Image: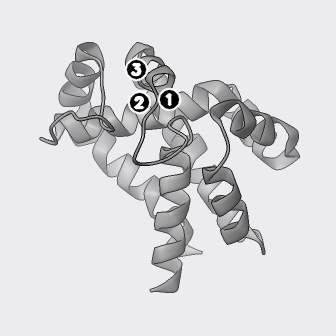
Amino acid sequence: MKSIICVLTLIVCFMGVAEGQRSNLSDEARKAIQEYPLTMPRANQLISALEEMTKYVVSLPDYAERVKKSMQMTAAEQAAQLEKDPKSAAILKKNQLTAKEYIVGVPALRMALLVAGGAPQSANIVASPANVTFAKANYSVLKPKMDAADGAGSRR
């Protein structure tokens, strides 16, 4: 049970990276998420990076503290943190992503999948029409991959 809570906390962190605080998606974050173009290659890169990043962060002895601290950072601070951590930077590089692409792309993909799955758009769930169309067309492939990436830490 503890590992599930920790993984969920981690997921909220990375899902909320672009939004700063879960309950208040900033106008800047909303715009970045809506403008982020999803493609199948990019979705696969994001999911692969998310799975690796989750495994890495959960493996750290101070991961709960890191997640808590990260949730209080701005998107720019979170990007800088990812870039200065050698392992995080290596994960992003391996998946051909910048820190900003990861920070914006993971929530963009997650929210597009939420909307494609029937969740209504709201102040904190936003997706461009193009990304929703993409997510609906690829839902049966992407949703299981995203679910697996979300549960990556609980299998360690």
Is residue 63 visible in the rendered structure shown here? yes
Q: Amino acid at mark 2?
A: Ala
Identify the residue at horizontal 30%, vertical 25% (top origin).
127
In depth, the one of 45 and 130 nearer the eye is: 130
Disc 2 packing (10 Å; few <14; some 14–19; many ≥20): many
Q: Amino acid at mark 1?
A: Gly
Q: Quadrant of the C terminus?
A: bottom right
Query: How much space separates mark 2 and mark 1, taking CA atoms?
Result: 5 Å
User: Which label is found at residue 105?
Assistant: 1
**Image depth: mark 1 or mark 3 in front:** 1
- Disc 3: which residue: 38
Q: Is residue 127 above or below residue 53?
A: above
Q: Give the quadrant of residue 33.
A: top left
Local secondary structure at mark 3: loop
Q: Which residue is disc 2 drawn over?
A: 108
For the residues bearing labels 2 and 3, Cβ distance under 8 angstroms? yes
- Mark 1 Cα shell of 10 Å, populated few (<14), some (14-19), many (≥20): many
Q: Nearer the viewer, mark 2 or mark 3?
A: 2
From this view, report whether residue 25 is shown above or below residue 70.
above
Instruction: Give the camera-side residue of 118 and 25.
Output: 25
Q: Are marks 2 and 1 in contact (CB under 8 Å)?
A: yes
Name the secondary structure under disc 2: helix
SS type, badge 1: helix
- Is residue 85 toward the left or the right of residue 31 in the image? right
- Residue 18 percent coordinates (x, y): 54, 34
Instruction: Tell which residue pokes out farthest to the left in this image.
Output: 118
What is the distance, in whole Å, between disc 1 and disc 3 at their CAs? 8 Å
